[in-house]
Image: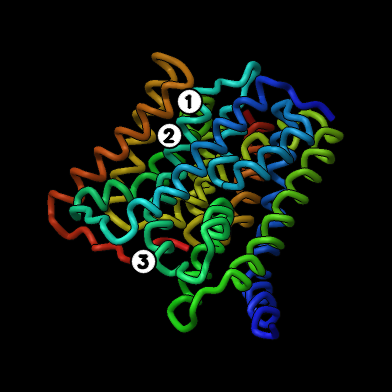
Amino acid sequence: MSTLRDDARRGLSDIWPAMLAAVPIGLLLGALAAGKGLSPLETMAMSVLVFAGGAQFAAVELWATPAPIGALVFSTLLINARHVLMSASLVPKLAGFSRGQTALGLYFMADENWALAEKRARTHALTPAYWFGMVVPFVACWVATSTLGAVVGAALGDPRRFGADFAFTALFIALVAAFWKGRVTFWTVAAAGLASALTYRLIGPPWHVLAGSLCGLAAAWFAAGSVGDAEPAPEMRP
Amino acid sequence: MTLDPHNLLAILGMALATYATRLAGLALAGRLQLSPRAQAAFDAIPPAVLVAVIAPSALATGWPETAAALLAALAATRLPLLGVVAVGVAAVVALRALA
Protein backbone atom coordinates (compact mmCIF):
# COMPACT_ATOMS: atom_id res chain seq x y z
CA MET A 1 0.00 0.00 0.00
CA SER A 2 2.81 2.36 0.89
CA THR A 3 4.47 1.64 -2.49
CA LEU A 4 1.34 2.96 -4.09
CA ARG A 5 1.63 6.23 -2.22
CA ASP A 6 5.39 6.41 -2.75
CA ASP A 7 4.96 5.93 -6.50
CA ALA A 8 2.26 8.58 -6.72
CA ARG A 9 4.44 11.01 -4.75
CA ARG A 10 7.42 10.17 -6.96
CA GLY A 11 5.30 10.98 -10.02
CA LEU A 12 4.30 14.33 -8.57
CA SER A 13 7.86 15.26 -7.65
CA ASP A 14 9.04 14.34 -11.17
CA ILE A 15 6.36 16.35 -12.98
CA TRP A 16 6.29 19.59 -11.03
CA PRO A 17 9.07 21.45 -12.91
CA ALA A 18 7.23 20.75 -16.19
CA MET A 19 4.01 21.85 -14.50
CA LEU A 20 5.54 25.14 -13.45
CA ALA A 21 6.89 25.76 -16.95
CA ALA A 22 3.41 25.14 -18.38
CA VAL A 23 1.72 27.79 -16.22
CA PRO A 24 2.55 30.86 -18.36
CA ILE A 25 2.05 28.82 -21.55
CA GLY A 26 -1.45 27.85 -20.38
CA LEU A 27 -2.29 31.44 -19.51
CA LEU A 28 -1.04 32.55 -22.93
CA LEU A 29 -3.10 29.89 -24.71
CA GLY A 30 -6.24 30.98 -22.88
CA ALA A 31 -5.64 34.67 -23.59
CA LEU A 32 -5.09 34.00 -27.30
CA ALA A 33 -8.17 31.79 -27.45
CA ALA A 34 -10.20 34.61 -25.90
CA GLY A 35 -8.77 36.95 -28.55
CA LYS A 36 -10.19 34.62 -31.22
CA GLY A 37 -13.62 34.70 -29.59
CA LEU A 38 -13.50 31.36 -27.76
CA SER A 39 -15.33 31.44 -24.43
CA PRO A 40 -13.60 30.31 -21.22
CA LEU A 41 -15.84 27.23 -21.20
CA GLU A 42 -14.84 26.35 -24.76
CA THR A 43 -11.18 26.83 -23.90
CA MET A 44 -11.59 24.60 -20.87
CA ALA A 45 -13.39 21.95 -22.93
CA MET A 46 -10.54 21.99 -25.43
CA SER A 47 -7.88 21.65 -22.73
CA VAL A 48 -9.72 18.73 -21.08
CA LEU A 49 -10.70 16.90 -24.27
CA VAL A 50 -7.68 17.51 -26.47
CA PHE A 51 -4.90 18.15 -23.93
CA ALA A 52 -2.15 18.75 -26.49
CA GLY A 53 -0.40 22.12 -26.21
CA GLY A 54 1.12 22.40 -29.68
CA ALA A 55 -2.06 21.30 -31.43
CA GLN A 56 -4.15 23.65 -29.28
CA PHE A 57 -1.96 26.65 -30.13
CA ALA A 58 -2.19 25.78 -33.82
CA ALA A 59 -5.96 25.36 -33.52
CA VAL A 60 -6.41 28.75 -31.88
CA GLU A 61 -4.25 30.34 -34.59
CA LEU A 62 -6.45 28.71 -37.28
CA TRP A 63 -9.69 29.45 -35.42
CA ALA A 64 -12.33 31.54 -37.21
CA THR A 65 -16.09 31.96 -37.06
CA PRO A 66 -17.53 29.53 -38.01
CA ALA A 67 -14.80 27.12 -36.93
CA PRO A 68 -13.06 25.47 -39.94
CA ILE A 69 -13.56 21.94 -38.60
CA GLY A 70 -11.73 20.11 -41.39
CA ALA A 71 -8.64 22.31 -41.12
CA LEU A 72 -8.65 22.09 -37.31
CA VAL A 73 -8.89 18.30 -37.24
CA PHE A 74 -6.31 17.92 -39.99
CA SER A 75 -3.80 20.21 -38.31
CA THR A 76 -4.37 18.44 -34.98
CA LEU A 77 -3.81 15.06 -36.59
CA LEU A 78 -0.59 16.21 -38.26
CA ILE A 79 0.86 17.90 -35.20
CA ASN A 80 0.05 14.94 -32.97
CA ALA A 81 1.24 12.29 -35.42
CA ARG A 82 4.39 12.01 -33.30
CA HIS A 83 2.20 10.48 -30.55
CA VAL A 84 1.95 7.34 -32.68
CA LEU A 85 5.65 6.68 -32.23
CA MET A 86 5.63 7.84 -28.62
CA SER A 87 2.80 5.53 -27.58
CA ALA A 88 4.25 2.64 -29.60
CA SER A 89 7.36 2.97 -27.47
CA LEU A 90 5.46 3.44 -24.19
CA VAL A 91 2.82 0.69 -24.46
CA PRO A 92 5.18 -2.27 -23.84
CA LYS A 93 6.17 -0.58 -20.56
CA LEU A 94 2.58 -0.43 -19.28
CA ALA A 95 2.50 -4.10 -18.31
CA GLY A 96 1.12 -3.39 -14.82
CA PHE A 97 -1.82 -1.40 -16.17
CA SER A 98 -5.36 -2.74 -16.55
CA ARG A 99 -7.11 -2.17 -19.89
CA GLY A 100 -9.02 0.76 -18.47
CA GLN A 101 -5.90 2.28 -16.92
CA THR A 102 -4.08 1.95 -20.25
CA ALA A 103 -6.93 3.57 -22.17
CA LEU A 104 -7.22 6.44 -19.69
CA GLY A 105 -3.47 6.73 -19.24
CA LEU A 106 -2.82 7.08 -22.97
CA TYR A 107 -5.61 9.64 -23.27
CA PHE A 108 -3.44 12.06 -21.29
CA MET A 109 -0.07 11.18 -22.79
CA ALA A 110 1.78 14.41 -23.65
CA ASP A 111 5.40 15.19 -24.51
CA GLU A 112 6.42 15.95 -20.93
CA ASN A 113 4.82 13.05 -19.04
CA TRP A 114 5.74 10.65 -21.84
CA ALA A 115 9.40 11.64 -21.60
CA LEU A 116 9.40 11.32 -17.80
CA ALA A 117 7.71 7.92 -17.94
CA GLU A 118 10.25 6.65 -20.48
CA LYS A 119 13.01 7.86 -18.17
CA ARG A 120 11.43 6.19 -15.14
CA ALA A 121 10.92 2.93 -17.07
CA ARG A 122 14.67 2.59 -17.59
CA THR A 123 15.19 1.95 -13.86
CA HIS A 124 11.78 0.98 -12.42
CA ALA A 125 8.63 -0.82 -13.44
CA LEU A 126 6.11 1.78 -14.57
CA THR A 127 3.12 1.69 -12.20
CA PRO A 128 -0.32 3.26 -12.62
CA ALA A 129 0.27 5.11 -9.32
CA TYR A 130 3.40 6.76 -10.72
CA TRP A 131 1.76 7.57 -14.06
CA PHE A 132 -1.39 9.09 -12.61
CA GLY A 133 0.61 10.80 -9.85
CA MET A 134 2.25 12.71 -12.72
CA VAL A 135 -0.66 13.07 -15.06
CA VAL A 136 -3.49 14.19 -12.77
CA PRO A 137 -1.80 17.34 -11.39
CA PHE A 138 -0.31 18.13 -14.81
CA VAL A 139 -3.68 17.96 -16.54
CA ALA A 140 -5.38 19.91 -13.73
CA CYS A 141 -2.74 22.63 -13.96
CA TRP A 142 -3.06 22.91 -17.76
CA VAL A 143 -6.86 23.08 -17.64
CA ALA A 144 -6.85 25.63 -14.80
CA THR A 145 -4.25 27.98 -16.31
CA SER A 146 -5.68 27.93 -19.84
CA THR A 147 -9.20 28.59 -18.53
CA LEU A 148 -7.91 31.39 -16.30
CA GLY A 149 -6.05 32.82 -19.29
CA ALA A 150 -9.31 32.87 -21.27
CA VAL A 151 -11.14 34.70 -18.47
CA VAL A 152 -8.39 37.28 -18.02
CA GLY A 153 -7.67 37.54 -21.75
CA ALA A 154 -11.27 38.40 -22.59
CA ALA A 155 -11.07 41.36 -20.19
CA LEU A 156 -7.86 42.65 -21.80
CA GLY A 157 -9.41 43.30 -25.20
CA ASP A 158 -7.70 43.39 -28.62
CA PRO A 159 -4.53 41.28 -28.37
CA ARG A 160 -2.94 43.20 -31.26
CA ARG A 161 -2.41 46.17 -28.97
CA PHE A 162 0.19 44.26 -26.97
CA GLY A 163 1.53 42.33 -29.94
CA ALA A 164 -0.05 39.24 -28.36
CA ASP A 165 -1.27 38.11 -31.78
CA PHE A 166 2.40 37.64 -32.63
CA ALA A 167 3.03 35.52 -29.53
CA PHE A 168 2.03 32.39 -31.50
CA THR A 169 4.50 33.09 -34.22
CA ALA A 170 7.29 33.61 -31.69
CA LEU A 171 6.23 30.58 -29.66
CA PHE A 172 6.16 28.34 -32.72
CA ILE A 173 9.58 29.60 -33.78
CA ALA A 174 10.86 28.63 -30.32
CA LEU A 175 9.21 25.19 -30.62
CA VAL A 176 10.74 24.62 -34.04
CA ALA A 177 14.14 25.31 -32.46
CA ALA A 178 13.38 22.61 -29.89
CA PHE A 179 12.80 20.11 -32.71
CA TRP A 180 15.98 21.20 -34.54
CA LYS A 181 18.08 18.36 -35.92
CA GLY A 182 20.42 20.21 -38.28
CA ARG A 183 20.42 20.16 -42.08
CA VAL A 184 17.27 18.07 -42.55
CA THR A 185 15.29 20.45 -40.33
CA PHE A 186 16.68 23.44 -42.21
CA TRP A 187 15.30 22.16 -45.54
CA THR A 188 12.05 21.15 -43.87
CA VAL A 189 11.55 24.64 -42.44
CA ALA A 190 12.57 26.42 -45.64
CA ALA A 191 10.24 24.34 -47.83
CA ALA A 192 7.32 24.43 -45.40
CA GLY A 193 7.59 28.19 -44.86
CA LEU A 194 7.87 29.07 -48.54
CA ALA A 195 5.11 26.70 -49.68
CA SER A 196 2.78 27.82 -46.91
CA ALA A 197 3.27 31.56 -47.50
CA LEU A 198 2.82 31.14 -51.27
CA THR A 199 -0.30 28.99 -50.88
CA TYR A 200 -1.73 31.48 -48.40
CA ARG A 201 -1.23 34.31 -50.91
CA LEU A 202 -2.36 32.45 -54.04
CA ILE A 203 -5.11 30.13 -52.78
CA GLY A 204 -5.91 31.17 -49.22
CA PRO A 205 -6.44 29.51 -45.85
CA PRO A 206 -6.67 26.80 -44.63
CA TRP A 207 -4.82 25.16 -47.55
CA HIS A 208 -1.50 26.71 -46.57
CA VAL A 209 -1.21 24.25 -43.64
CA LEU A 210 -1.58 21.19 -45.88
CA ALA A 211 0.64 22.52 -48.67
CA GLY A 212 3.32 23.74 -46.29
CA SER A 213 3.37 20.57 -44.20
CA LEU A 214 3.55 18.24 -47.18
CA CYS A 215 6.33 20.24 -48.84
CA GLY A 216 8.21 20.23 -45.53
CA LEU A 217 7.90 16.44 -45.22
CA ALA A 218 8.96 15.96 -48.84
CA ALA A 219 11.99 18.18 -48.22
CA ALA A 220 12.92 16.12 -45.15
CA TRP A 221 12.58 12.91 -47.17
CA PHE A 222 14.89 14.20 -49.91
CA ALA A 223 17.37 15.84 -47.55
CA ALA A 224 17.67 12.68 -45.44
CA GLY A 225 18.30 10.50 -48.48
CA SER A 226 20.71 12.74 -50.36
CA VAL A 227 23.69 12.14 -48.06
CA GLY A 228 22.42 9.18 -46.09
CA ASP A 229 23.46 10.69 -42.77
CA ALA A 230 20.00 10.65 -41.25
CA GLU A 231 20.40 9.81 -37.60
CA PRO A 232 18.47 6.73 -36.50
CA ALA A 233 16.65 8.99 -34.01
CA PRO A 234 15.87 6.44 -31.31
CA GLU A 235 15.29 9.20 -28.77
CA MET A 236 12.25 11.38 -29.29
CA ARG A 237 12.33 14.99 -28.21
CA PRO A 238 10.97 15.27 -24.67
CA MET B 1 -19.90 31.05 -20.27
CA THR B 2 -21.09 29.77 -23.62
CA LEU B 3 -20.48 26.57 -25.52
CA ASP B 4 -21.31 26.95 -29.18
CA PRO B 5 -22.41 23.58 -30.68
CA HIS B 6 -20.33 24.13 -33.82
CA ASN B 7 -17.25 24.97 -31.74
CA LEU B 8 -17.89 21.92 -29.56
CA LEU B 9 -18.03 19.77 -32.67
CA ALA B 10 -14.67 21.15 -33.78
CA ILE B 11 -13.19 20.46 -30.33
CA LEU B 12 -14.58 16.91 -30.31
CA GLY B 13 -13.07 16.33 -33.76
CA MET B 14 -9.71 17.51 -32.48
CA ALA B 15 -10.06 15.32 -29.37
CA LEU B 16 -10.84 12.26 -31.48
CA ALA B 17 -7.87 12.88 -33.80
CA THR B 18 -5.56 13.32 -30.81
CA TYR B 19 -6.78 10.24 -28.97
CA ALA B 20 -6.39 8.17 -32.13
CA THR B 21 -2.70 9.10 -32.35
CA ARG B 22 -2.21 8.25 -28.66
CA LEU B 23 -3.97 4.87 -28.93
CA ALA B 24 -2.22 3.93 -32.16
CA GLY B 25 0.75 2.66 -30.15
CA LEU B 26 -1.39 -0.23 -28.87
CA ALA B 27 -1.67 -1.59 -32.40
CA LEU B 28 1.87 -0.73 -33.44
CA ALA B 29 3.89 -1.59 -30.36
CA GLY B 30 6.85 -3.75 -31.24
CA ARG B 31 6.31 -3.91 -34.99
CA LEU B 32 7.10 -0.43 -36.20
CA GLN B 33 10.07 -0.49 -38.58
CA LEU B 34 10.61 2.74 -40.48
CA SER B 35 13.29 3.23 -43.11
CA PRO B 36 15.76 6.02 -42.21
CA ARG B 37 14.14 8.28 -44.81
CA ALA B 38 10.63 7.61 -43.55
CA GLN B 39 11.90 8.16 -40.02
CA ALA B 40 13.37 11.53 -41.06
CA ALA B 41 10.08 12.55 -42.66
CA PHE B 42 8.22 11.41 -39.55
CA ASP B 43 10.55 13.38 -37.28
CA ALA B 44 10.07 16.42 -39.51
CA ILE B 45 6.29 16.46 -38.96
CA PRO B 46 6.26 18.78 -35.92
CA PRO B 47 8.55 21.51 -37.34
CA ALA B 48 6.92 21.27 -40.79
CA VAL B 49 3.43 21.73 -39.36
CA LEU B 50 4.47 24.48 -36.96
CA VAL B 51 6.17 26.46 -39.74
CA ALA B 52 3.27 25.90 -42.14
CA VAL B 53 0.88 27.34 -39.56
CA ILE B 54 2.85 30.53 -38.86
CA ALA B 55 4.34 31.26 -42.29
CA PRO B 56 1.49 33.60 -43.37
CA SER B 57 1.91 35.66 -40.20
CA ALA B 58 5.73 35.65 -40.39
CA LEU B 59 6.27 36.00 -44.15
CA ALA B 60 3.13 37.40 -45.74
CA THR B 61 1.89 40.15 -43.38
CA GLY B 62 4.41 42.97 -43.48
CA TRP B 63 8.05 43.80 -42.86
CA PRO B 64 7.67 44.36 -39.09
CA GLU B 65 6.33 40.81 -38.65
CA THR B 66 9.03 39.30 -40.87
CA ALA B 67 11.77 41.20 -39.02
CA ALA B 68 10.33 40.25 -35.63
CA ALA B 69 10.18 36.59 -36.73
CA LEU B 70 13.87 36.74 -37.66
CA LEU B 71 14.70 38.26 -34.27
CA ALA B 72 12.66 35.55 -32.54
CA ALA B 73 14.51 32.87 -34.53
CA LEU B 74 17.80 34.40 -33.40
CA ALA B 75 16.58 34.48 -29.80
CA ALA B 76 15.51 30.83 -30.10
CA THR B 77 19.15 29.79 -30.42
CA ARG B 78 19.88 31.06 -26.89
CA LEU B 79 16.72 31.68 -24.86
CA PRO B 80 14.07 29.36 -23.38
CA LEU B 81 10.52 29.28 -24.74
CA LEU B 82 9.11 32.25 -22.86
CA GLY B 83 12.19 34.39 -23.51
CA VAL B 84 11.69 33.88 -27.25
CA VAL B 85 8.03 34.85 -26.97
CA ALA B 86 8.97 38.00 -25.03
CA VAL B 87 11.57 39.01 -27.64
CA GLY B 88 9.18 38.37 -30.53
CA VAL B 89 6.29 40.29 -28.98
CA ALA B 90 8.44 43.25 -27.90
CA ALA B 91 10.04 43.40 -31.36
CA VAL B 92 6.73 43.35 -33.21
CA VAL B 93 5.25 46.09 -31.01
CA ALA B 94 8.32 48.30 -31.51
CA LEU B 95 8.59 47.65 -35.25
CA ARG B 96 4.87 48.19 -35.88
CA ALA B 97 5.18 51.55 -34.16
CA LEU B 98 7.96 52.44 -36.64
CA ALA B 99 6.12 51.15 -39.69
Residue A163, placed above or below residue A69: below
Badge 2: chain ID: B
Q: CA distance from mark 3 to mark 2?
A: 25 Å
Viewer-closest of A112 and B65 = A112
Q: Are marks 3 and 1 on the same chain?
A: no
Q: Is residue B40 left or right of residue A72?
A: left
Badge 3: chain ID: A
Binning the other alpha carbons within 10 Å of mark 3 as few (below 14), some (14 to 19) or many (20 upward) gives few
Residue B5 image offset from top left, x and y in percent = 70, 21
- Residue at the spot of label 1: B60
- Residue at the spot of label 3: A235
Q: Secondary structure at mark 2?
A: helix
Residue A105, placed above or below residue A7: above
The amino acid on which the numbered mark 2 sits, given as a three-letter code, is: Ala
Residue A223, placed above or below residue A215: below
Q: Nearer the viewer, mark 2 or mark 1?
A: 2
Badge 1: chain ID: B
- Name the residue located 65 percent from the left edge and 84 percent from the top edge: A3
- Name the residue located 36 percent from the left edge and 35 percent from the top edge: A213
Q: CA distance from mark 2 to mark 1?
A: 12 Å
- Name the residue located 26 percent from the left edge and 57 percent from the top edge: B31
- Residue at the spot of label 2: B52
The amino acid on which the numbered mark 3 sits, given as a three-letter code, is: Glu
Q: Secondary structure at mark 3?
A: loop
Binning the other alpha carbons within 10 Å of mark 1 as few (below 14), some (14 to 19) or many (20 upward) gives some
Q: Are marks 2 and 1 on the same chain?
A: yes
The amino acid on which the numbered mark 1 sits, given as a three-letter code, is: Ala
Viewer-closest of B36 and A77 = A77
Q: Is residue A115 left or right of residue B33?
A: right
